[in-house]
């Protein structure tokens, strides 16, 4: 199969309507959203677009069934989530194909996301039955204190285009486990995966109205629900600017908020690092999803004495990766999500080069790629001057930007020289040294001597301008629970 001959057709059973009240249907005003295939630039599908009326109807139904869903036993909710986990695995091939077609991401990366997303349903199926309260006596000795946790109520989730399944799963699974209903607004670039998941959740036994999925060509049609006091929780993954703006809107109604926002992850390589490990981890920490990952390594900070060796070895390792259409099985990285993303990456690289950076790799795209696809060449830059825009902005593309430091203290200072604090990576053969640097980095998550970081059993989230709250782990379900205190006489 050549780069000009690759799968471009969706599975026949992919829904394209709004999912409201357990039904897939057209939008009330007849609006639609065109979904493009980034691998070749063609229209992949046309899906219904939600109006404000559709959003209101979805919330009406969520409110209507909230009490009933909250009253189901935790065991029943657990079994439904477990069934969802099983169904995702049964339909893993379809889900991976849908994601690769609408996102333009390499099939092997999409297959990894399916497995990752499924684990959230398994994890929170187990957590649903383990929510604990507390009983204690007042220190004054005049009261008994009972603490219990109850569902926060109807939720709104806004998910990004770069992980169309996992980001929805990371929000839906704990919300359902906690006993909350949820309206999901997927990104207009990648709505098909979430619509397919809605079908699987219905098959798993999620009652009608508990989950709604509302693609929209106008995001404000769905975010208008933040004006409704019946909504009790807002969870968002996306850009810092948009997330903070919507959080301000939620605050007007005292709606609880959790945000996973932008990142600018440092990849710190100390001079005692195992070079093979540090180089190989780049393929995961940077190149997964062609770099379109919120926790992707963004700034490669390498100790000066080993910077040249590291850069040259990274170049040789990156030359082994194959770029091509997303649905070819032997492709390592594929297209970007759209022409807008290609333009953003191009501007950051051009700025660095104009300021004096050195390009070691990335002069041109490989031959044979579809001309209308949204591709950008894997690029390695070195000698990044201070002040370059690429050091302050999320690249979200296959660009490795290397700069140097001379001491551990300078490494920490450069790593923290950003408004963001989502993820970080540290490489050192000395555990004490690695931990010392990792603990000083201002990030919600730090990987030591590895390029993979996410785990459904661990709390995912950032500090500073990278967000509020945590998803996954033991902490994840509590984002969807309120704490109630009952005082009893003694």
Image (spheres, grey):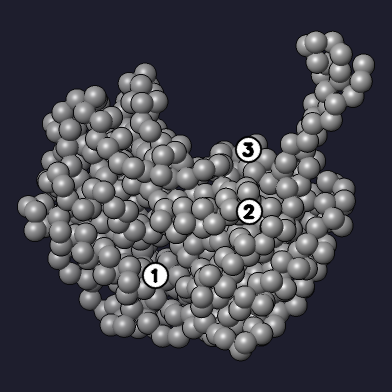
Q: Residue at x 41, y 56 (%)?
A: 241
Lower sequence index among marks 3 and 2: 2
The residues bearing labels 3 and 2 have C-alpha atoms spaced at a distance of 24 Å
How far across and down, in percent of the image, does residue 137 sit? 83, 16
Q: Which residue is label 2 attached to?
A: 253
Q: Is mark 1 on a helix, strand or loop?
A: loop
Image side of residue 277 versus residue 245, left or right: left
> Which of labels 3 and 2 is toward the front?
2
Q: Which residue is label 1 attached to?
A: 337
How far across and down, in percent of the image, does residue 356 sit? 7, 52
Numbered marks: total = 3
Q: Which residue is label 3 attached to?
A: 475
Q: Is mark 3 on a helix, strand or loop?
A: loop
Q: Which residue is drawn at 24% across and 35% down?
A: 414
> Which of labels 1 and 3 is toward the front?
3
Disc 3 and disc 2 in contact, CB within 8 angstroms: no
Disc 1 and disc 2 in contact, CB within 8 angstroms: no
């Amino acid at each position: 199969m050549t780069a000009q001959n690759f799968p471009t057709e969706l599975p026949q059973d992919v829904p394209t309507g709004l999912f409201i009240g357990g039904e897939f249907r057209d939008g009330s005003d007849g609006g639609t959203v065109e979904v493009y295939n980034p691998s070749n630039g063609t229209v992949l599908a046309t899906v219904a677009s939600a109006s404000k009326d559709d959003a209101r109807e979805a919330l009406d139904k969520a409110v209507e069934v909230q009490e009933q869903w909250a009253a189901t036993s935790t065991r029943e909710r657990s079994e439904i989530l477990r069934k969802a986990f099983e169904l995702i695995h049964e339909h893993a091939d379809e889900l991976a194909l849908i994601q690769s077609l609408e996102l333009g991401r390499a099939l092997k990366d999409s297959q990894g996301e399916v497995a990752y997303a499924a684990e959230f349903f398994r994890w929170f199926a187990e957590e649903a039955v383990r929510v604990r309260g507390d009983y204690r006596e007042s220190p004054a000795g005049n009261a008994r204190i009972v603490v219990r946790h109850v569902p926060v109520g109807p939720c709104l989730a806004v998910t990004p285009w770069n992980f169309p399944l996992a980001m929805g799963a990371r929000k839906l699974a704990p919300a359902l486990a906690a006993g909350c209903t949820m309206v999901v607004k997927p990104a207009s670039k990648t709505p098909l995966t979430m619509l397919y998941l809605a079908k699987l959740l219905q098959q798993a036994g999620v009652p009608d109205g508990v989950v709604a999925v509302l693609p929209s060509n106008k995001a404000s049609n769905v975010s208008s629900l933040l004006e409704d006091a019946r909504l009790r929780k807002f969870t968002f993954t996306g850009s810092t600017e948009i997330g903070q703006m919507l959080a301000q809107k939620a605050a007007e109604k005292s709606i609880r908020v959790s945000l996973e926002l932008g990142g600018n992850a440092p990849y710190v390589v100390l001079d005692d690092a195992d070079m093979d490990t540090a180089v190989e981890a780049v393929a995961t920490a940077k190149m997964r999803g062609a770099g379109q990952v919120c926790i992707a390594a963004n700034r490669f900070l390498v100790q000066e004495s080993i910077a040249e060796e590291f850069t040259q070895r990274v170049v040789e390792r990156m030359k082994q990766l194959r770029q091509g259409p997303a649905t070819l099985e032997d492709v390592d990285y594929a297209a970007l999500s759209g022409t807008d993303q290609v333009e953003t990456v191009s501007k950051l690289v051009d700025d660095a080069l104009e300021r004096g950076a050195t390009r070691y790799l990335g002069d041109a795209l490989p031959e044979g790629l579809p001309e209308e696809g949204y591709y950008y060449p894997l690029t390695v830059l070195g000698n990044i001057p201070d002040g370059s825009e690429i050091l302050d902005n999320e690249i979200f593309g296959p660009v490795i930007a290397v700069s140097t430091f001379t001491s551990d203290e300078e490494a920490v200072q450069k790593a923290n020289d950003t408004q963001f604090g989502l993820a970080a990576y540290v490489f050192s053969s000395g555990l004490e040294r690695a931990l010392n640097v990792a603990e000083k980095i201002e990030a919600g998550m730090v990987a030591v001597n590895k390029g993979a970081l996410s785990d459904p059993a661990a709390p995912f989230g950032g500090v500073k301008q990278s967000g509020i709250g945590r998803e996954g782990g033991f902490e994840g379900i509590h984002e969807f629970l309120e704490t109630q205190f009952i005082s009893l006489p003694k």
